[in-house]
Image: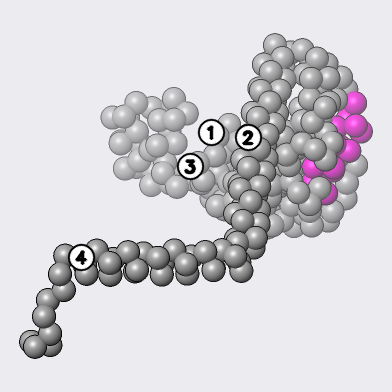
């Protein structure tokens, strides 16, 4: 208050010392009661952090080693040494390998089996990839396509359609390969209209390889389905006309007639 005299310098020092003593006493009392718990919690946190860092470092090194093994095996396969490539990845087939590395190892071994003429072994490896719940979905789908392509001659058309129908849709990454297999199965099953539509869809998909599109275009024509979108572009791509000739041909044709249904 206004009537209370200001504390002297000695009083200020005494007040500060008492305040610090109170703080120290409170801290001492807190540590006396809870110090063991606090220390235990800190040590546990340090242990968890250290364990995570060790695990993360080990995991990173393990993944790096697995990647190097896959790359080395692919280099061997590129040199047509599939036997060595298959042996190189044999250690990645266990549960200690990452799902992606394990699937890649099986793909490499399947390729080696095909190179050696062992279609049964290759089909079994693709089946393992597709059946493994840890396999990345995209690799599962690829394994399904590869397995059906190997077993196609021994399968009934209905089986081929059932196994790949969900992949044989525009926009799917495996639409080209799966679509062609399903279209052929539809044709063998007597479903010419369905086969023709699917072949036409494949031929019009500009994201697919031209060799595949060309085959599909021919098959669609045999089914009586018009699979040509741009006549001038087709004539140019096929080397039939130059740019100027293509313009003239397009003006007169409008669209190439599809072959009559067989």
If you read the primary sequence from the N terminus, does the residue marked by circle 3 or circle 2 appear first?
Answer: 2
Query: What is the distance, in whole Å, between disc 3 and disc 2 at their CAs?
Result: 44 Å
Q: Residue 142, percent across and down? A: 70, 42
If you read the primary sequence from the N terminus, does the residue marked by circle 1 or circle 2 appear first?
Answer: 2
Using residue 104 as the reference point, say whether residue 175 is left or right of it: left
Residue at mark 4: 10
Using residue 188 as the reference point, say whether residue 250 is left or right of it: left
Residue at mark 2: 57
Q: Quadrant of residue 216?
A: top right
- Mark 3 falls on what kind of element? loop
- Mark 4 falls on what kind of element? helix
Residue at mark 1: 210
Using residue 3 as the reference point, say whether residue 113 is left or right of it: right
Q: Residues within 10 Å of mark 1 (few under 14, many from 20)?
A: few
If you read the primary sequence from the N terminus, does the residue marked by circle 4 or circle 2 appear first?
Answer: 4
**202 within the magenta span:** no
Q: Residues within 10 Å of mark 3 (few under 14, many from 20)?
A: few
Query: What is the distance, in whole Å, between disc 1 and disc 4 at their CAs?
Result: 96 Å
For the question of whether residue 107 can be seen, the reply is no
Q: What span is in magenta?
A: 118-131
| 174 relative to 121, above or below | below
Mark 2 and mark 1 in contact (Cβ < 8 Å)? no
């Amino acid at each position: 208050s206004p009537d209370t005299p200001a504390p002297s310098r000695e009083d200020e020092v005494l007040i500060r010392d008492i305040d610090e003593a109170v703080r120290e006493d409170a801290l001492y009392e807190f540590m006396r009661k809870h110090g063991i718990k606090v220390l235990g919690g800190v040590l546990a946190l340090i242990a968890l952090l250290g364990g995570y860092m060790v695990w993360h470092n080990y995991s990173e090194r393990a993944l790096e080693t697995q990647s190097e093994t896959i790359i080395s095996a692919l280099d061997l396969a590129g040199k047509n040494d599939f036997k060595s490539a298959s042996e190189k990845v044999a250690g990645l087939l266990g549960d200690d390998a990452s799902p992606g590395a394990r699937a890649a190892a099986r793909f490499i071994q399947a390729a080696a089996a095909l190179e050696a003429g062992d279609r049964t072994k290759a089909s079994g490896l693709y089946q393992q990839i597709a059946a493994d719940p840890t396999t990345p979905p995209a690799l599962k789908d690829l394994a399904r396509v590869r397995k059906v392509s190997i077993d196609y001659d021994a399968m009934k058309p209905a089986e081929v359609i059932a196994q790949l129908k969900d992949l044989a849709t525009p926009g799917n990454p495996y639409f080209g390969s799966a679509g062609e297999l399903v279209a052929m199965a539809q044709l063998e099953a007597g479903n010419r209209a369905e086969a023709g539509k699917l072949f036409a869809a494949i031929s019009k998909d500009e994201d697919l390889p031209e060799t595949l599109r060309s085959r599909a275009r021919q098959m669609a024509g045999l089914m009586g389905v018009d699979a040509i979108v741009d006549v001038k572009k087709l004539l140019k791509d096929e080397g039939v006309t130059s740019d100027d000739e293509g313009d003239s041909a397009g003006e007169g044709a409008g669209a190439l007639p599809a072959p009559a249904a067989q």
